[in-house]
Image: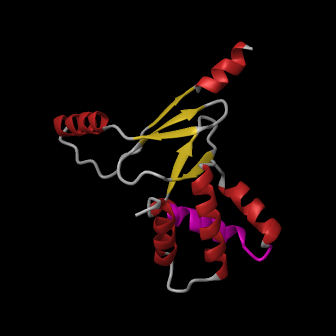
Amino acid sequence: MNIEERIENAVKKMGTRNTQPRQIIAEKMKELGRTGALFSAEELWQELRRTHPEIGRATIFRSIEKLVEFKVLDRIQFEDGDHYFRVCCLEGHHYHLACTRCRRILEFENDSAAQQLSIIAKQANFDIEKRALTIFGCCEACRKNARN
């Protein structure tokens, strides 16, 4: 299933009525999925209310939480405590590299990392319910800019 279908399915799961705010949010999520842009809930609300002033802040925040729950959005928390979101382009278990300077996020899959986590959990007699791994560092572009 492609990301646009996953977004549509998640929005349908949010409630029985396909309201205009949900349609607007779904279209924006599709756009963000194509660009890979990182956003905060507040930024999304500010942007959408410029063209759709009827959309409430609470609607945006609740929708984001539901989309995280349905694994359509990834939530990344940076050291400063700020939460950012990104449309999750990979289904299943995946991980993130996050640049602490420009806040660019790269998704990657790694079967050996998943196997290692399973081994660690088994040794600790621990059942994994959910995985979230974000590795923070500095991307190549930011390192180059720092040298110049």
Pinpoint residue 54: horizontal percent, then vertical percent.
77, 77
Q: Tell me what residue is drawn at x 51 percent, y 65 percent.
A: 4
Above or below residue 84? Residue 78 is: above
Q: Tell me what residue is drawn at x 66 percent, y 69 percent.
A: 58
Q: Quadrant of the C terminus?
A: top right
Q: Nearer the viewer, residue 82 or 135?
A: 135
Pinpoint residue 129: horizontal percent, then vertical percent.
30, 52
Q: Which residues are magenta?
A: 53-67
Q: Quadrant of the N terminus?
A: bottom left
The answer to whether 148 appears left or right of 11 in the picture is right
Pinpoint residue 111: horizontal percent, then vertical percent.
28, 38
The answer to whether 113 appears left or right of 31 in the picture is left
Q: Is residue 58 magenta?
A: yes
Q: Is residue 97 magenta?
A: no
| Residue at the extreme top | 147
Pinpoint residue 30: horizontal percent, then vertical percent.
59, 62
| Residue at the extreme bottom | 17
Above or below residue 53? Residue 2 is: above
Above or below residue 77? Residue 62 is: below
